[in-house]
Image: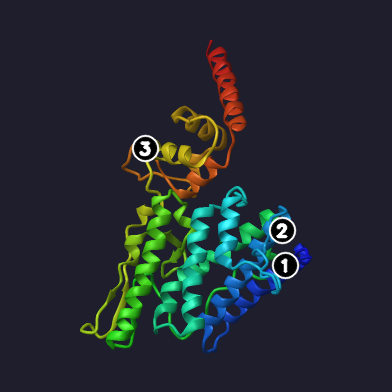
Amino acid sequence: MSAPYVSIQRLIDNSLSAMLAAVEVYNKPQMTYRDEVSVMLVVNAWELALKAALRQNRKSIFYRKIPGQRYLSISIDDALGRVNGASLWPQGVDGAATTANIKALTEYRDRAIHLYNADGLGAMIHPFLQQNVLNYRDFVLARFKKDLADSMTWQLLPLGATTPADAVQFMKADKSATIVAEVEEFVNELRDLVDDAEAGGADMGRVAVVYDIHLRSQKHVTGADLVVAVSPTADGKIAIRRTDPNQTHPYSATELVRRVNQKRPGRELNKHDLQVICWKEQLRDNTRYAWKHSNAGSHVWSGDAVAYLASLDDKVFDRLRREYREWQRGERARRG
């Protein structure tokens, strides 16, 4: 007996519905169990979207059938593994970072489903949840030509009796040793996910997003940001530590080229390739990719720059080299 037919259209439509429901639930002014329900829906949305991507590429979304039992579809962890194994992440969506982001939410969901999460973990998961929605939108738009933004308003700002929480955040937690241990364990798991992604050269801007009090995108998360103080002798407070905003663009030109070469196939790029694409596309003027302090002599580069350059094949860089040579000849001829 062959595996049952699965509609790609139904998978992606239901996925979009789950993500929209998650956003709607999270933004309700009064709702208990908000974080848990939102994360469950977000994880469900990703599982369906990943399965749709696998089916789109004629990949199985079922486990090997056991005689006498019905076909079982794969879990989200296995779906992530198969999408990564088949290199199905679209250009511009960093697979390693997006995987780390989804796994952070999956860990939170599993804890909520099988028992419950300690108070205060919702604020820790929020940066991952916010970035997850952005990652999802990019993934679905690139893979299925469906834009989540068509069904929601992105310009909404939270209105409430208090100002939005800053990245340095203090929350009351149960001071019992059991709860403190649970929070510390969860934070350690988040830190491991972030550290592994960072060590693998992932675009850290795809892992989590942190906003400052003015709701501007502030920086990319690192493992160091998740060194959280939790102590029964400190009023049970949890503190999320803030780091230097310069961490959004941590790479020198040399390090940028090295990381790009680690992530892309084809010939090895060098600084001349970086020079020609900066000439052509004015990358140094795009703060998403490059930043330069007023007192510094050179630019520094972001994880987005790594992901973008790694997405371009040799033909693009070879063409840009030719155009750059022609431009140089023209400039020399013009100067006489």
Residue 252 vertical position relative to residue 212 in the rendered view, above or below: above
Q: Nearer the viewer, mark 2 or mark 1?
A: 2
Classify 10 Å Cα crowding around label 2: few (below 14), some (14-19), many (20 and above).
some
Which of the pair 30/197 is nearer the observer? 197
* Quarter assignment of residue 20: bottom right
Which amino acid type is marked by label 2? Arg
The residues bearing labels 1 and 3 have C-alpha atoms spaced at a distance of 47 Å
Q: Dots 2 and 1: beta carbons under 8 Å?
A: yes
Q: Is residue 327 visible?
A: yes
Q: Position of residue 26 (x, y in %)?
A: 56, 79
What residue is drawn where x is 58% and y is 26%? 318
- Mark 2 residue element: helix
Q: CA distance from mark 2 to mark 3?
A: 46 Å
Taking depth in this image into account, of 326 and 114 the one nearest to the observer is: 114
- Gap between marks 2 and 1, in whole Å? 10 Å
Q: Position of residue 164 (x, y in %)?
A: 44, 76
Which residue is labeled 3 in the image? 298
Look at the numbered disc 3 and give the secondary structure of its residue.
loop
| Location of residue 183 with respect to 313 vertically, above or below | below
Q: Nearer the viewer, residue 277 or 81?
A: 81
Q: Amino acid at mark 3?
A: Ser
Tell me the amino acid under the disc marked 1: Leu
**Upstream in sequence: badge 2 or badge 1:** 1
Q: Characterize the local packing of mark 1: few (<14), some (14-19) or many (20 or more) Cα atoms within 10 angstroms.
A: many
- Regarding residue 221, the answer to whether it shows in the image is no
Q: Nearer the viewer, mark 1 or mark 3?
A: 1
Residue mark closest to the camera, 2 vs 3: 2
User: Which badge, 2 or 3, comes first in the chain's sequence?
Assistant: 2
Task: Specify whether 326 is left or right of 294.
Answer: right
**Residue named by callout 1:** 11
- Circle 2 residue: 55
For marks 1 and 3 on the same chain, the one whose residue lies earlier in the sequence: 1
